[in-house]
Image (cartoon, helix red, strand yellow):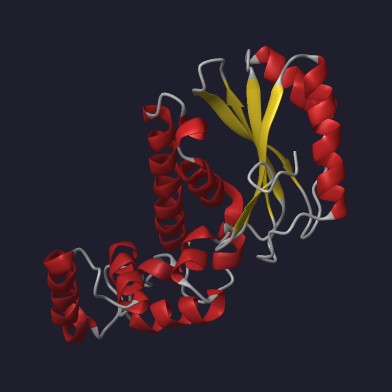
Amino acid sequence: MKKEPVNTAPEDEKDDPKEPDYIGHRQRLKARFLADRGRSMPDYELLELVLTYALPRRDVKPLAKELLKRFDSLENVCTSAPEELAEVKGVGENVIVLLNLIHTCVYKICGEKLHEKDSPYMLDRGYIVEYCRAAIGYSRYENLMIIYIDQHGKLIKDSIEQVGSLDTVAVSPREVVTKALLYHASSIIVSHNHPSGDCTPSDSDMRMTRALKESLQVMGIILYDHIIVGPKNSYSMKSRHCL
């Protein structure tokens, strides 16, 4: 007896027998997006349209709704870690790469705005806040990012120095000072995220900030700001006169 061929494609690439039923729907989604670049489309339809490019042979509306239900918002879907996305049935490598790619592009775009400014942190703190939020604000774990700035107020580089637990992150003032000297930075901005969304600094945040400021001052380096970010909120210690 002749054996039927076995479909060995990954879970997120297997053919869907219902394909003829939703081809027209996809075309209508594309047309609606092009009409106003998606501004009038609800989040589940935007996500559905994105998923069509990762899963070209499947009806993706149920998956789009399941992802939004699981992660609460479109932002959270695109910024969730690969291992968290993989827990959702029907999500494979193609979906994970595409969703995380969107987040990375947003992060890069925010960084380009800073490089275009002569004195980015002096002119508009809003750029810095959005950059920090795009980089670490949506993480479910605390991250510490340092932004190194030269004597002309231009961004030299940034790096995520520490990744902590759900509610704590440690920092070594000595390591930060060493890297600031290595990059010839005259000032730095520190940022870390609060996964809870409440950006009010804790007592340990304040102690860490004071210790870091004192260590930098010895070497003539300025701690310009310490910004705490979350998905929606932020807290600038400079603007609150905590420095």
Does residue 38 lie above or below 193 as drawn? below
Q: Nearer the viewer, residue 234 or 144?
A: 234
Does residue 93 lie above or below 123 as drawn? below
Quadrant of the rendered image containing residue 42: bottom left
Q: Nearer the viewer, residue 100 or 39?
A: 39
Left or right: 226 in relation to 86: right
Left or right: 82 in relation to 174: left
* Quarter of the image where the N terminus is located: bottom left
Q: Residue at (61%, 61%) from the top-left corner? A: 83
* Quarter of the image where the C terminus is located: top right
Residue 60 appears at what percent x and percent y?
A: 34, 77
Q: Residue at (47%, 69%) from the top-left corner? A: 91
Q: Residue at (55%, 26%) from the top-left corner? A: 157
Residue 19 appears at what percent x and percent y?
A: 22, 80
Left or right: 111 in relation to 194: left
Q: Residue at (46%, 74%) from the top-left corner? A: 90
Does residue 183 lie above or below 12 as drawn? above
Residue 187 appears at what percent x and percent y?
A: 64, 23
